[in-house]
């Protein structure tokens, strides 16, 4: 994963355990065949599954929620 993407995503989700869990859950989904929620061709670089998950967070395509449905920020 690219460190600049981690830094940007950490500004959106400042709680490291929540960020880690969200990224790992999304990477699992991508590995199972789910389509990315962003246009990966527009970035002009090779993206791993973790990078895609981080970009989805940065672009607001996915966000963490608590068990009661409230944002976990």
Image (cartoon, rainbow, N blue to C red):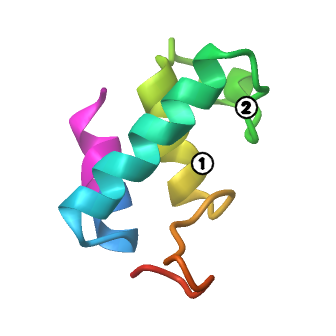
Give, as a single range, the part of the protein colored magenta: 1-7
Foreground of the two, 5 or 50:
50
- Residue 27, position as x, y percentages in the image: 51, 29
Is residue 29 highlighted in magenta? no
- Residue 12, position as x, y percentages in the image: 40, 71
Q: Are there few (<14), some (14-19), or many (20+) residues within 10 Å of tag 1? A: many
Residue found 57% across the figure and 87% down from its top: 70
Quadrant housing residue 59: bottom right
Residue at numbered disc 2:
36
Residue at numbered disc 1:
56
Q: Is residue 65 visible?
A: yes
Vertically, is 31 above or below 59?
Answer: above
Quadrant housing residue 2: top left
- The quadrant of the image that shows the C terminus is bottom left
Judged from the image, the secondary structure of the residue bearing numbered disc 1 is: helix
Judged from the image, the secondary structure of the residue bearing numbered disc 2 is: loop
| For marks 1 and 2 on the same chain, the one whose residue lies earlier in the sequence | 2
Q: Is residue 52 visible?
A: no
Residue found 63% across the figure and 24% down from its top: 30
| Predominant SS of the magenta segment | helix
């Amino acid at each position: 994963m690219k460190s600049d993407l981690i830094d940007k995503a950490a500004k959106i989700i400042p709680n490291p355990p929540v960020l880690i869990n969200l990224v790992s859950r999304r990477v699992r989904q991508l590995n199972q065949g789910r389509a990315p929620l962003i246009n990966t061709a527009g970035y002009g670089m090779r993206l791993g599954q973790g990078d895609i998950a981080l970009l989805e967070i940065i672009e607001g395509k996915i966000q963490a929620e608590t068990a009661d449905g409230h944002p976990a920020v």
